[in-house]
Amino acid sequence: MRIIGFAGWSGAGKTTLIVKLIPALIARGFSVSTLKHAHHNFDVDKPGKDSYEHRMAGAREVLVASDLRFALMHELRGAPEPSLATLLGKLAPVDLVLVEGFKRDSHMKLEVYRAANGKPLLYPEDAHIKALVSDLPPNDVPADVARAHIDDVEAVASLALQLATPWP
């Protein structure tokens, strides 16, 4: 299994890019999973559903399964947030894991950047950012970093595959 991260400020287009990238990588013959960091109080379940009621009643884990999919929800109940390594260990083996967020971790990353956000680049402050995926004109991109335009999904796929590293 290999991993590559996608880091950037909120609103840069990380999720939109990854949604386009997944089918492009699958078309190249790779199996792909994603791991996304979310903010504090996200929820994937709805009040009134049995699985939600089980969690609210205090279950640490709730696994919901059908003939189409299964989902495992794990409540930390005060335990520390799991590390990227711990979370990667919970995934079934695939060729490539696209990691969205976890920008402070030390895996190889592509920075997704939109000039309209008005935020500074994370590169070069993060030594693990090895490529810039942005809408910046080529002359505005530092010469020492690989680059792809944010709308060029095939170029981004090539960069992701080139920079992905084995895990663990």
Image: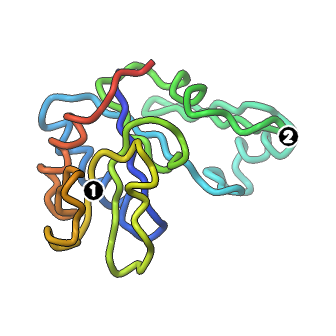
Q: Residue at x 53, y 46 (%)?
A: 102
Residue at numbered disc 1: 132
Q: Nearer the viewer, residue 153 or 46?
A: 153
Snapshot quadrant of residue 32 = top left
Q: Nearer the viewer, mark 2 or mark 1?
A: 1
Q: Please identify the quadrant where the C terminus is shown.
A: top left
In the image, is residue 147 above or below residue 70?
A: below
* Horizontal and vertical percent position of residue 114: 33, 72
Q: Amino acid at mark 1?
A: Leu
Indicate the secondary structure of the residue bearing disc 1.
strand
Snapshot quadrant of residue 85 = top right
* Horizontal arrangement in the rendering, residue 19 relative to residue 90 (left or right): left
Badge 1 density bin: few <14, some 14–19, many ≥20, Cα 10 Å: many
* Horizontal and vertical percent position of residue 149: 17, 62
Residue at numbered disc 2: 78
Q: Residue at x 22, y 65 (%)?
A: 141
Q: Nearer the viewer, residue 145 or 156?
A: 145
Indicate the secondary structure of the residue bearing disc 2.
loop
* Horizontal arrangement in the rendering, residue 87 relative to residue 62 (left or right): left
